[in-house]
Amino acid sequence: MSYDLIVIGGGPAGYLACERAGHAGLKVLLIEKQFIGGVCLNEGCIPSKTLLYSAKIYDYARFSDKYGVTAENVTFDHKKVITRKNKVVKTLVNGVKGKLKSYQVEIIEGKGEITGKTDQGYQVQVGDNMYTGSRLLIATGSTPIVPPIPGAKAGFDQGYVLTNREILDLDQIPESLVIIGGGVIGLEMASYFNSAGSTVTIVEMLDHIAGYVDPDIAKILQKNYEKKGIRFQLNAKVTEIKEDGVVYEYEGGQSFIQGDKVLMSIGRRPVTDGIGLEKIGVELERGAIKVDNTGKTNIPEVYAAGDVNGRSMLAHTAYRETEVCINTILGKRDTMRYHTVSSVIYTNPEVAMIGETEVSAKEKGIDFESATISMRYSGRYVAENEGGDGICKILVDKKYRHLIGVHMIGNYASEIIYGAAILMETEMRIEDIKEIVFPHPTVSEVLREGIFEF
Ligand code: NAI
């Protein structure tokens, strides 16, 4: 069978490519080996947010007396939470399948492997069948990094070492949980399991959590977590995993933390093996498929979008990358603009950011000024966040007077940050932003208030 486009991988990059291409009238084949929706819908973004929402409701109920509400006998039923999570996932996966069907996208369940190119196009084999595509889009995603730490393999085999996949389906809340890696997954899962009753310790190799997040915001987040009882061991490198905990190096010595379960969340790597990329000579760079800003690889009519290109590893980046690929295929001019991709950590409080941090702006030699204001400038924030200590940090290019970065910690930040993305995409000048009316009272007003610092 011949197609205008064969897409390998049915996660956000893959399924949206099919929807957009199908909508444009292309004959599309989607090959997916495991589940439509990929990691994001099945074992990443959506299930974790469903769990976190249950934890948030539980926390609101338990700690509501400061808002004048007293609730007794509040309980948390983890099994029910997981059942609901599975229902949410099913609803969304079915939604995606329905949309693909409406665009006449053909779906094949199985592992696709590129075998070569003929005059008709690229050949992709699934089982005993061969499919031909005039174009290919590789969207095979990423997989958790599992370092060769002694004891890790045995731990995975015996079920006490987990990745983001297995931890979302635990049938019981462990009494204690050690999380290796204080990045996005580690922090989000720490939030859930702490609320659900585990004793949680995060072991992080660096001297700070949350990777490239603004250092002031990372400190506030850590302080909030510590108040809830989450423990941190920074500057600690894990050297061995045992059945009852984790051994790590700290200040030249060896220490041990007890844990019934261990979550391995030290990053993800692109999936580039076993799909036949070498058969057509697709170039890799540091383990990822090398692409330009339109998603083109070094091979004509072969594109790559999403985590597999290693550029941003976020579902919403994948969506946009894939749209750029399809537009390029359709002959429309389009390009990725990575500097306006925002990111969110769905902790409680939430963290959201876009653009340069003070550190990265200095490294790039950008002449900028920054202002930090308390989220307590927002009336709604004060009303809804008893004791909240969130901040909003804004960076402005001194010469062009437009935003180059916004960093927030405090709830609703996740829903506000796209506003900053629009201001950055349109390169609005500070003076013009000041004329925009924000609804009152909203937490978003913090952004407007911050702009008046310049
Ligand atoms: P990450 O890259 O965010 O964090 C990994 C952390 O592990 C880093 O802080 C690193 O210093 C630390 N680390 C590495 N080796 C270590 C060792 N041996 N011992 C102790 N610490 C060690 O990776 P994470 O959390 O696994 O997330 C993976 C990907 O998933 C990310 O690319 C992220 O963008 C994506 N993701 C995004 C979410 C969101 O946007 N809200 C949610 C969940 C995942």
Image (cartoon, helix red, strand yellow):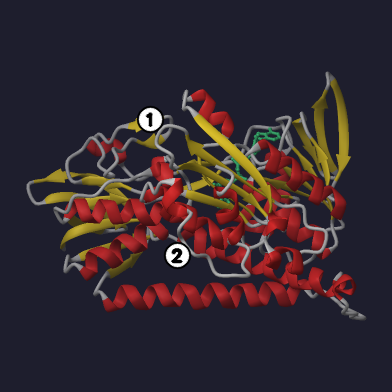
The answer to which of marks 2 and 1 sits earlier in the sequence is 2
**Label annotation for residue 275:** none
Q: Give the residue at mark 2.
A: 37
Please, what is the three-letter code of the amino acid marked with disc 1?
Answer: Glu
How dense is the environment of label 1, judged by Cα within 10 Å: few (below 14), some, or many (20 and up)? few
The C terminus sits in image quarter = top right
How many marks do you count on the picture? 2
Within-10-Å neighbours for mark 2: few <14, some 14–19, many 20+: many
Q: Is residue 387 left or right of residue 161?
A: right
Seen at 26% across and 51% down, the residue is 325
Ligand 1 shows up in the quarter that is top right
Residue 32 in percent (x, y) is at 38, 61
Foreground of the two, 49 or 425: 425
Q: CA distance from mark 2 to mark 1?
A: 26 Å
Q: Position of residue 322 (x, y in %)?
A: 32, 54
Q: Residue at x 17, y 66 (%)?
A: 27
Amino acid at the residue labelled 2: Gly
Q: Which of the pair 375/235 is nearer the observer?
A: 375
Residue beneath label 1, please?
Answer: 285
